[in-house]
Image (spheres, coloured by chain):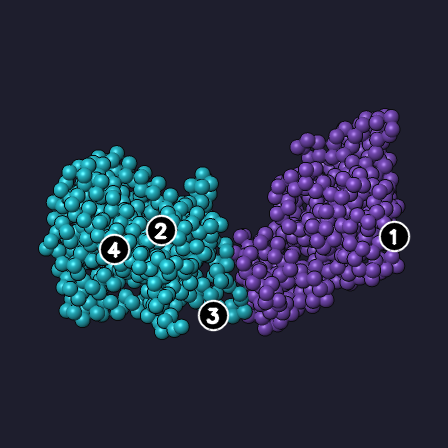
Chain colours: A purple, B cyan
């Protein structure tokens, strides 16, 4: 597929990175030649320097025969204009734009074909916010992901010594409406069949109907105390959204070093307490009761700052610390160390985009374990003759090694997949892929052959 | 002196408009034949002539007002018009002194409702109509009216309007043009008055009486054509209409305007001042009713509630009607009600006092200082309806509160200095500065201000003017900086 990506910032480059490995022709446009060069050094793609909304630059980037435009520059307006131009002047069939301002999203006409012709709008800040809010709601989980419009959830928990999970075979676990779809021990993955035994320190991925998620978690591990007090370090875009999302139900404090930004925060927030100061200022943390905090979230745009402040917070008594870390090497360094959860923004946000790029009718994609594994939701079409998945029992499907069908959603019904589950047309199938290299084969399963079309 | 001439020219124009408003009581007088027509006609003739003369003398001095001239203009209008407004009363009641007549007119125009007259029931209905019509004109502001009728003030008009309209934040612009805003406000005001008059007629009043009382209800003035005020009617219906319209008139007319223009109730939801106003009044009514029953003033709760609703709403909105002599209620209740009148009504309403908006801001500011003790590094802006209130507004409000406190204290002291008893002096000062009307003690709802001597009367007259123009507009004229070239 020919893809044009506008913007080579954090979002743009991580999009490019994930798509480059999937046999796509990529062109990246950015104002900064330096950024482009860095990208070109690492990945096999073409770059064009220039303003992303100028038609001549778009032509240079080969927009004429592009299949997909991904506009993820810093500026909403540039992204909107580029999408409109791509649709009206260059007939690009699909257009994705990064839109931050909620004002543009309030009325669907703005993005519709009377407006700016955007097929899909994504807001990485919002996705990250939702991610962290889930962690606040489920303090036991490492990650909570939604499928099928929120009907099914995937939770990742870490098994603790002495917990109900550890030392038992999977088939002994009583979880009724749940299925353990993957176990990771260190860097290895363990096939979750009946004989597998969970050890302390394992990361366990469990699929369950969203309504049952709390019960299921209770069986997986002892419950932590619910979160009441949250401290947010960094009042940027994510910090503000997070504080707004949490301030009604939790006691929220937010620390920001920029005085002017603090004024903006204080104006937009109603209950959260806005504190001016450095996120690594021991005295400030002490004065504001860091030791009583149930959760400390570091979301500045500086990796080192996030790491240091969350380490400090943990040392000073915060119950659980979460840090936003962009650099992959740092994430690997810190996960499961003193920082309870290290979130990689690129991995957290890439899924929405990937769903649009994949072949087959893929509804949702979630990157797991720093992109090594993937959980995806796809729709089965056709019939037994035209599709390799529809109208078959699960054990009849030719799944690549390390791939598990976790659940099937039929209308409003959630069915946990077993070897004899029958997949019908229009079912949403949730597949867990532990080895990313087998992805093309999985995608092919969900494509219907030409005869059907 | 050129500057003064320009201002005088505008005052002359406003005076002529004012003369035109005298047509209403004149017409009513002729229509019902109450023998007051001569007084009205003579007053109107004299007012018009004076205005015309002043205008002729200064007609070459027309130009746009400077910002600072606006304060002079407004204060001058508000001192000159009451003088002309005394004419019908002086002509019809030859034994009334000018001091008392001027007090009565000032009390009318500032929508205060303090009266020196007794035997109101025996006056011609047209004269009572004139008294309440004064309140009606002053309630929304005569200059707002002048701006609405004649585009005479140009750009400077916004400054003048700011000087006359109450409330700490006057920057909110309802329409792009100042004349449109003035028209809009008067349109809503007139609409409410018409509805109120219809309500009174429905409740059983005659047409003239309904109009008379509608004028003083919607302006939150409080004049009545009966010595016994609303106790005269002794009708639940009348009281219900009065209470509803007093409450409505205590809300920001800008909000009313937005609601009427958009034909939606949504603006009310976004008015935090109104929520606080209705909340405080509602809670006070309940408290007073229960306290009255517990202290045996009324035996039954429904009866107590009826009196509490009417009198508390009347005092809290700075109207000043009464259905009971609340000065005779337990002193705790009487003083609490007096406290309500100092802050309850909303900014840009027809009410007096410091306005709920300032009270809310002060409350938040105090709370912020306390919270800052616990969280020294926290940034806590004062907010109203989700919007941050700039610090300079907070400072202005603080300064206003200081001036307000000093003024109230000074007037109370001056009145006690003339030999008045403390309760009367304190309540008279509160009731006039906040444009309430009746106070406690000798000037309570059962008495009048007629017992005051000349000097005391003039102090109260000044207090009403200060209160109506929210102090600053008048006090700025007393600063040397104002008169410096």
Q: Badge 3 local density, few (<14 within 10 Å), some, or many (20+)?
A: few
Neighbours of disc 2 within 10 Å: few (<14), some (14-19), many (20+) = many
SS state under label 4: helix
Where is residue A341, by image quadrant? bottom right
Q: Nearer the viewer, residue A240 or A221?
A: A240
Around disc 1, counting alpha carbons within 10 Å, would you say few (fewer than 14), some (14 to 19), or many (20 or more)? some
The residue that mark 4 highlights is: B50
B131 and B291: which is toward the camera: B131
Quick check: B254 left or right of B329? Answer: right
Q: Tell me what residue is drawn at x 58 percent, y 63 percent.
A: A262
Q: Nearer the viewer, mark 1 or mark 4?
A: 4
Residue A263 position (above or below residue A83): below
Compute the Cα span from label 3 to label 2: 50 Å
Q: Circle 2 sits on which residue? A: B146
Question: Image point 54% across, 52% down: which residue?
Answer: A249
Which badge, 4 or 2, is on the more N-terminal residue? 4
SS for callout 2: helix
Quadrant of image for the N terminus of chain B: bottom left
Q: Do the residues under discs 3 and 2 have CB atoms within 8 angstroms? A: no
Q: Which quadrant, please, contains the C terminus of chain B?
A: bottom left
Q: Which one is in front in this view, the residue at disc 4 or the one at disc 2?
A: 4
Which residue bears the numbered disc 3?
A: B373
């Amino acid at each position: 597929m020919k893809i044009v990506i506008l913007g080579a910032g954090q979002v743009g480059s991580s999009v490019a990175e994930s798509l480059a490995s999937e046999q796509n022709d990529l062109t990246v446009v950015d104002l900064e030649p330096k950024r482009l060069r860095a990208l070109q050094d690492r990945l096999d793609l073409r770059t064009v320097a220039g303003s992303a909304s100028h038609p001549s630059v778009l032509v240079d980037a080969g927009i004429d025969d592009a299949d997909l435009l991904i506009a993820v520059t810093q500026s909403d307006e540039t992204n909107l204009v580029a999408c409109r131009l791509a649709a009206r002047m260059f007939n690009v069939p699909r257009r994705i734009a990064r839109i931050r301002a909620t004002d543009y999203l309030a009325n669907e006409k703005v993005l519709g074909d009377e407006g700016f012709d955007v097929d899909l709008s994504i807001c990485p800040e919002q996705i990250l916010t939702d991610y962290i809010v889930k962690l606040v709601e489920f303090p036991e989980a490492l990650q909570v992901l939604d499928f099928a419009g929120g009907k099914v959830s995937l939770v990742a928990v870490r098994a603790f010594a002495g917990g109900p999970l550890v030392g038992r075979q999977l088939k002994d676990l009583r979880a009724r409406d749940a299925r353990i779809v993957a176990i990771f021990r260190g860097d290895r993955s363990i096939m979750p069949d009946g004989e597998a035994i969970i050890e302390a320190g394992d990361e366990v991925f469990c699929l369950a109907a969203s309504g049952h998620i709390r019960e299921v978690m209770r069986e997986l591990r002892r419950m932590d105390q619910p979160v009441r007090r949250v401290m947010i370090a960094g009042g940027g875009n994510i910090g503000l959204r997070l504080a707004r999302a949490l301030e009604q139900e939790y006691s929220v404090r937010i620390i920001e070093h920029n005085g002017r930004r603090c004024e903006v925060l204080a104006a937009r927030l109603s209950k959260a307490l806005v504190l001016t100061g450095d996120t690594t200022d021991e005295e400030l943390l002490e004065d504001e009761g860091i030791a009583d905090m149930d959760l400390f979230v570091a979301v500045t745009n500086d990796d080192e700052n996030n790491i240091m402040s969350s380490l400090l917070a943990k040392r000073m008594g915060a119950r659980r610390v979460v840090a936003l870390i962009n650099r992959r090497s740092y994430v690997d360094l810190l996960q499961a160390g003193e920082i309870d959860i290290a979130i990689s923004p690129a991995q957290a946000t890439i899924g929405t985009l990937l769903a649009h790029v994949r072949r087959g009718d893929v509804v949702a994609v979630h990157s797991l374990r720093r992109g090594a594994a993937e959980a995806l939701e796809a729709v089965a079409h056709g019939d037994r003759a035209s599709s390799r998945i529809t109208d078959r029992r699960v054990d009849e499907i030719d799944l690549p090694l390390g791939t598990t069908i976790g659940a099937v959603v039929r209308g409003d019904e959630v069915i946990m997949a077993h070897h004899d589950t029958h997949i019908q047309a229009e079912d949403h199938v949730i597949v867990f892929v532990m080895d990313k290299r087998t992805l093309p084969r999985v995608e092919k399963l969900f494509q219907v052959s030409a005869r059907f079309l | 002196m050129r500057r003064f001439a320009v201002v005088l020219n505008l005052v002359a124009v406003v005076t002529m408009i004012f003369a035109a408003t005298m047509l209403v009581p004149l017409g009513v007088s002729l229509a019902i034949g109450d023998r007051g027509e001569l007084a009205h006609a003579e007053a109107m003739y004299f007012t018009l002539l004076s205005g015309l003369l002043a205008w002729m003398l200064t007609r070459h001095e027309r130009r746009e007002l400077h910002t600072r001239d606006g304060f002079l203009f407004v204060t001058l209008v508000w001192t000159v018009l009451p003088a002309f407004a005394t004419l019908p009363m002086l002509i019809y009641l030859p034994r009334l002194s000018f001091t008392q007549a001027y007090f009565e007119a000032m009390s009318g125009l500032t929508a205060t409702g303090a009266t020196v007259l007794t035997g109101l029931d025996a006056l011609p209905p047209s004269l009572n109509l004139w008294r309440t019509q004064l309140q009606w004109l002053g309630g929304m502001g005569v200059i707002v009216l002048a701006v609405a009728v004649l585009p005479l003030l140009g750009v400077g008009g916004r400054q003048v309007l700011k000087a006359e309209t109450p409330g700490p934040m006057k920057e909110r612009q309802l329409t792009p043009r100042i004349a449109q805003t003035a028209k809009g406000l008067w349109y809503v005001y007139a609409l409410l008055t018409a509805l109120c008059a219809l309500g009174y007629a429905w409740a059983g009043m005659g047409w003239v009486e309904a109009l008379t009382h509608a004028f003083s209800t919607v302006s939150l003035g409080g004049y009545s054509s009966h010595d016994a005020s609303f106790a005269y009617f002794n009708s639940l219906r009348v009281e219900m209409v009065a209470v509803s319209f007093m409450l409505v008139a205590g809300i920001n007319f800008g909000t009313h305007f937005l609601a009427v223009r958009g034909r939606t109730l949504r603006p009310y939801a976004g008015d935090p001042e109104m929520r606080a106003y209705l909340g405080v009044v509602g809670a006070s009514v309940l408290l007073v009713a229960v306290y009255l029953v517990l202290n045996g003033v009324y035996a039954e709760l429904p009866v107590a509630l009826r009196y509490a609703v009417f009198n508390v709403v009347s005092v809290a909105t700075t109207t000043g009607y009464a259905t009971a002599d609340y000065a005779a209620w337990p002193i705790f209740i009487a003083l609490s009600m007096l406290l309500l009148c100092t802050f309850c009504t909303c900014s840009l309403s027809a009410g007096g006092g410091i306005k709920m908006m300032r009270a809310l801001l002060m409350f938040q500011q105090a709370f912020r200082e306390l919270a800052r003790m616990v969280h020294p590094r926290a940034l806590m802006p004062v907010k109203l309806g989700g919007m941050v209130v700039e610090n300079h507004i907070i400072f202005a409000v603080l300064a206003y509160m200081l001036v307000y406190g000093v003024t109230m204290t000074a007037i109370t002291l001056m009145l006690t200095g003339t030999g008045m008893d403390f309760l009367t002096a304190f309540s008279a000062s509160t009731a006039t500065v906040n444009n309430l009307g009746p106070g406690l003690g000798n000037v309570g709802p059962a008495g009048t201000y007629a017992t005051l001597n000349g000097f005391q009367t003039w102090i109260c007259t000044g207090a009403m003017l200060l209160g109506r123009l929210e102090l600053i507009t008048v006090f700025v004229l007393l600063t040397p900086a104002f008169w410096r070239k």
